[in-house]
Image (tube, rainbow, N blue to C red):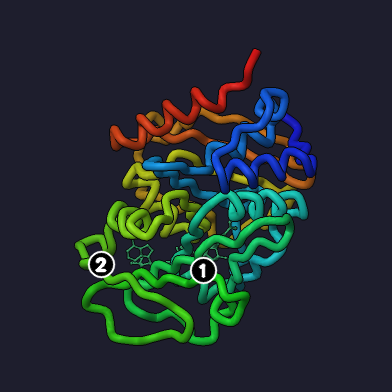
Amino acid sequence: MRQMVMSETLWSALLRYRETGTLPAARLRAEAGWQLYAPLVAHGAERVAVAQVGQSLDGRVATPAGDARDISGADGIGHLHRMRAMCDAVIVGVGTVIADDPSLSVRAVPGRSPVRVVVDCNATMPAGAQMLRDDGTPVLLIRAADAPASHARGTDEIRLPRGPAGLCPAAILSALAARGLTSVLVEGGARTIARFLEARLLQHLHVAVAPLIIGSGPTGLSLAPVERLAQAHRPEISTYDLGSDMLFDCRLAEATPAAAATRRTRSDEHRPEA
Ligand SMILES: NC(=O)c1ccc[n+]([C@@H]2O[C@H](COP(=O)([O-])OP(=O)(O)OC[C@H]3O[C@@H](n4cnc5c(N)ncnc54)[C@H](OP(=O)(O)O)[C@@H]3O)[C@@H](O)[C@H]2O)c1
């Protein structure tokens, strides 16, 4: 397990790398924070998609009544905001907007808020959502071509064909990439992450575990059932002690050759120097 110590120098180097691609000294590239966050940045033709879940020891993300606000500790929140600051866009399902009304901005660290993207297949985005009355960061709604016309003030819309399983996650990422949003954080909820994960579009899944036991309530990930443990995902993991929370950085096997090539290039680039 590596201890996460995020100095101002390292964070500034990560922000510079995100903006300009400038690599810092090898000493900084060997630090845990570089290893964790630099792979979230996409440059040139690269594409990166990662997901993050903040959960309790027993895998819950809310109580059965929907109280979800303070599961992650301060360091877990800091980690989430660093992930947002590294990415071009943050995606949530409309279920998360209805349940939690998040602003999806970067507040806990210096950095730019990502474009907010809501998968809003049937145009049910609440008109009074917090993210719509925030700081002017763009909000993009991903809707089915046949969804009712409904314009939420301050939003832009992408229409995609509705398939048998809803909107194709790969088409969502391609539509975002066409707008220059190539580094994407899928922040929840369970069904939205599941669709990207099952389509094998995610390079990393970050699971931040906070030391509390809720006992019942929704989980952070909801995949199709498997019969045997041999069918379970067994990702390669790196663990980080964030302070208040423990982080599992799960590296997922991607299906697309382009994504795999990207990952090979990036992991070579980010390997610490001996
Ligand atoms: N702790 C955390 O890290 C965290 C972060 C975010 C949210 N949450 C929690 O997650 C819960 C909400 O999760 P949820 O699973 O209920 O909702 P969700 O994933 O936020 O949103 C689900 C909605 O988005 C739609 N959707 C997502 N991807 C789609 C696609 N590719 N095509 C068509 N529709 C798509 C779903 O359609 P369908 O109805 O067709 O599935 C559904 O209407 C809340 O309890 C919230 O607190 C926790």
Q: Which of 97 and 22 is in front in this view?
A: 22
Tag of residue 96: 1
The residue carrying mark 1 has its beta carbon less than 8 Å from ligand 1: yes
The amino acid marked with disc number 2 is Leu
Q: How crowded is mark 2: few (under 14 residues within 10 Å), some or many (20 or more)?
A: some
Q: Nearer the viewer, residue 210 or 25?
A: 25
From this view, report whether residue 248 is shown above or below residue 269.
below
Q: In this view, does 215 lie to the left or right of 49?
A: right
Q: In this view, does 60 lie to the left or right of 119?
A: right
Task: Give me the residue at 39% from left, 46% from top.
Answer: 197
Point out the tag, 1 or 2, that comes first from the N-terminus. Answer: 1
From this view, report whether residue 69 is shown above or below residue 22.
below
Task: Give the quarter of the image for residue 214.
Answer: bottom right
Q: Where is residue 25 in the image (x, y as percent from the top left)?
A: 68, 27
Q: Position of residue 17 (x, y in %)?
A: 59, 41
Dot 1 falls on a residue whose secondary structure is helix
Q: Looking at the rendering, in which quadrant would you find the C terminus?
A: top right
Tag of residue 160: 2
| Picture quadrant of ligand 1 | bottom left
Task: Give me the residue at 62% from left, 59% from top.
Answer: 112
